[in-house]
Image: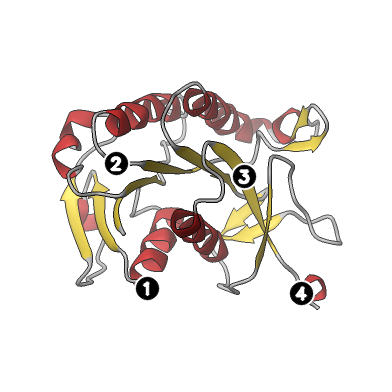
Amino acid sequence: MKILLIGASGNAGKRILEEALDRGHSVTAVLRDPSKLTLNHKNLTMVQGDLLNPDSILKYLDQQDAIISAYGPKHGEEEKLVVAAKNLVELIKSSKIKRLLVVGGAGSLEVAPGLALSDTPEFLDAWKPVAFAHRDALRVYEESDISWTFLSPSAIFEPGERTGKYKLGNTTLLSDENGLSRISMEDYAIAMIDELENKSYERKQFTVSSKTNKEVL
């Protein structure tokens, strides 16, 4: 497929980019500063653009099959996630692109019926601005009429090992037998590209967590 990837120089974006290229997809990486990405690949095109200025991206939409957004705002500018969501919806609507996949947040996942992770006492105040912004961005997609998918990671989401093993859930936070909710960015990227290829969660939020050896047996 031909993918327009936003945020390819970020931690999650880099892993998604590498996973897509390894599977033979063609990627146009939209970056505010293309010099931040040093990867060279025959199926990679790097272009300059800014999701907060959608007119700078319009010219790259032709012939693309999907947009994947790994956009992440700077600290203190979390509200820009909602602006980015609205811009993504308009970009899809103004093009022939059929799908939007978004790197979401874990804060909106439920830990009990009606109780989101971000509303629990243990959820740190420092994490709330970005969690609430992701929640509000999700509402933008839900209220749109485009084909979107919002992939929420586990509570612990960081670079790590590419195991190739993961488990999926809907809108409830997943954890292992020890109560740990974790996914490496490498395995998250696998789940994202699997969804791109298989289209199992259209117009839905879903989540991914690591699968332990005990769970695999």
| Residue at screen point 44% across, 30% down | 81
- Left or right of 184, for residue 29: left
Q: CB atoms at circles 3 and 1 under 8 Å apart? A: no
Q: CB atoms at circles 2 and 1 under 8 Å apart? A: no
Q: Earlier in the sequence, mark 4 or mark 2?
A: 2
| Residue at screen point 41% across, 36% down | 73
Residue 212 in percent (x, y) is at 75, 70
| Residue at the disc numbered 1 | 22
Q: Considering the numbered disc 1 on the image, is that residue within a helix, a strand or a loop?
A: helix
Q: Earlier in the sequence, mark 3 or mark 1?
A: 1
Say which of marks 4 and 2 sits in front.
2
Q: Considering the numbered disc 2 on the image, is that residue within a helix, a strand or a loop?
A: loop
| Residue at the disc numbered 4 | 216
| Residue at screen point 43% across, 62% down | 15
Q: CB atoms at circles 4 and 2 under 8 Å apart? A: no
Few, some or many residues within 10 Å of mark 2 (<14, 14–19, 20+) = many
Q: Quadrant of the N terminus?
A: bottom left
